[in-house]
Image (tube, coloured by chain):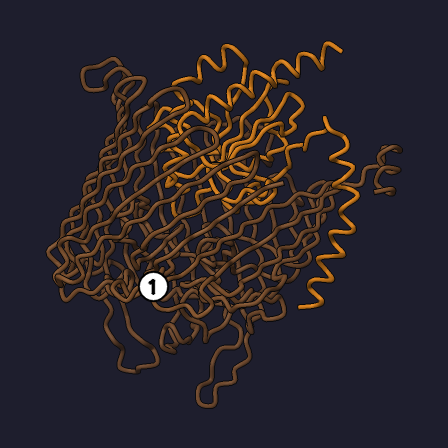
Chain colours: A brown, B orange
Amino acid sequence: MLFSSAAYAQNVDLGEVHGNFQVDAQYYREDSIIGAPDFPEDVGSNSFLNLIYTRGGFEAGLRYEAYLPTMQGFTRESGSGLPYRYARYKRDRLDVTAGTFYEQFGSGMILRSYEEWGLGWDNSIDGVRVKGEPVRGLQVTGLLGRMRNAQSNKVENLSEGLIRGINADWYINDSFDSLATAKTRISIGAGFVSRFQADNDPLLVIPQNVGAFSGRFNLSRGGFLFSAEYAQKINDPSTVNNFIYKDGNGILVQTSYAKKGLGVSLQFKRIDNMDFRGDRAASGNDLALNFLPPQTRQHTYRLATLFPWATQPLGEWSTQLEVLYKIKKGTALGGKYGTNITFNFSRINALNKVPTVNPFEGYTADFVGKMDSVLFQDINVEISRKFNKKFKATLNLLHFNYDESLFRQLTGFNTSEDVTADVQILDMSYKLKRKHTLRLELQHCATQQEFGDWAMALVEYTFAPHFFLAVFDEYNYGNAEEDQRLHYFSGTAGVNFSNYRIQLGYGRQRAGVLCVGGICRFVPASNGVTFSMTGTF
Amino acid sequence: MKRNFLLLFALIVISAPAAFSQAEASEKHREFPAADVKALDGSVVSSADFENDGKPMVVSFWATWCKPCILELQTILDEYDDWQDETGVKLIAVSIDDARNSAKVQPFVSGKEWPYEVYIDNNQDLKRALQVNNVPATFLLNGKREIVYQHNSYSPGDEEELYDHILETVKADADASAE
């Protein structure tokens, strides 16, 4: 204190400390009807605290994480540690980091490390990273390190594989004054990543250095955007691909057109044997080194999340079309405020794989996917309209098709045939008075398959900016097994004050899959009290 | 384990003076941090270059899949002309969409006729620099680019609270320049 007061009096810049934290905890009750197991410690909790110190171009930070013990549905070991700590110096166009960092090359098909707390996902890299801009418009990144093991909370326990990467993106318009204001903007980029892992296999001769390359091109002109990326990986026999000696590749093409009141995007992707990890023995959500973006709409309404999709790294062909249109305000159809419409179509097909004579070579596959067999398809439309100052409503209509084996694998629900489902969601909000709003969600899901029809209602009351209360019930009224026709009732209340938020809930939660950004985590059935607190300072 | 606690303790001891000196300077606000984000045409922009000619700015973190974020930006849309006329405020919407959805951001923004300045924080560098836990997260910057108010989550009516703070900021900025 004395030191700081003196320093303040002399107006010395001591830098700044900022941070954030989150505490999630749940009290578990055994509930044999929904399959919620006994949790011996009764309470599980996951928490973190980030601290970042900055002074001029210097920055240092750390994250303390505690799992006391780990909540259900997370694979991370119980205990605590400092899995994230770094020092970074940025000056002019040079940026050097020593310690833990997150990085992405292009769209991430050869390298993406990131963190998603709610999923227990963290594939940060611990090592050294240098970024620079040697020529205006040319951004170069080089890195060396090992990856964080998602199951560990210790920085000592990193991937066996050593990751080396280099990437360059050239924003051509920024390099030439004559092109600075050109309507057409072009950038090109390329990256290379290599993983070294010693071959300890007693039988097979396995490549110790596995290299992956990607090249990309982006063009924009007015409302038109085009981007394409190609990635290639040398043969990388691994647990996930069943130790085949076959190169992998991926193609991602995205294009869009936008003008006032209209947006259209069309995307295409082909992935073939592109599972790439920091350790060839890893599987599940562990040590993923790359990210293969799923081309499906990311749903957040509860019953629509019964049908999540995650890219199949061993092979898929996907297409997606999305159109947004705003019907002008003041027209018969548009109403006083205009009406927003979003149409989305996505379809995933398998690759046409033919096994090779030599089993170590795996298979051959045509470029074009197996178009007659749909792994996943989602056709949906959303109509959103404000009727007057107090009332607005959004209607969602969705139709899903889902391959049976992938449905079992990706959702945890049982089915003996391909799944077809129709979901309707009506979301209405009514402003009672200034800062007081009531919201009602009605959802329905109809299927012919075993897990049956669902209905859901949610009522939420908010008093801005401090308070909210929500109750909802999910009812699996059409389940094929009568004793599984259950209500999942829960209530949540929360308060916000300044930069802090506290939320308390009680209820029964169905088993399901939680997905953020295309990575999914299985959340087991539970019954009990949940607590969450977040803050930023 | 023990070592970790020692490390944490050491860091807090080292950093405490800085934190206290900040608290003592009651009117000193945090300056908006610098991190690279992408403009919709793909070019790289530093958040240090966000500016509004000395008038307040609202920086709102959102994502195409985040319902409350969209509700917030859609609600402000109806008020935005009035807000701009009365205070000159500018709203910058920073999308945290990753490679799955980032190519859909521009059609999304145009399709909804959002007049905001939009960037994509695809490696979440700006989000981390601001210690944003969840979206939506909204920051209000005064004319000197200092964070004078922040709010996370969105409930209908929060925009009125935000606007009250914008009016206060305009007044505080005017008072400061009159001195």
Residue A66 place in picture, x, y as percent: 57, 61
In the foreground, B54 or A93: B54
Q: Quadrant of residue A170?
A: top right
Q: Residue at x 71, y 67 (%)?
A: B3
B29 w.r.t. A63: above or below: above
Q: Residue at x 40, y 76 (%)?
A: A239
In the foreground, A232 or A66: A66
> Secondary structure under badge 1?
strand
Quadrant where the image shows the C terminus of chain B: top right
Q: Quadrant of residue B62?
A: top left
Tell me, yes or no, if residue A351 can be seen here.
no
Tell me, yes or no, if residue A280 can be seen here.
yes
- Reading the image, the residue beneath label 1 is A272
Residue A183 place in picture, x, y as percent: 46, 27
Quadrant where the image shows the N terminus of chain B: bottom right
Q: Residue at x 33, y 44 (%)?
A: A300
Please, which chain is the residue tagged with disc 1 on?
A: A
In the foreground, A247 or B32: B32
A338 w.r.t. A204: above or below: above
Residue that lies at the very extreme toward the bottom in this rendered image? A202
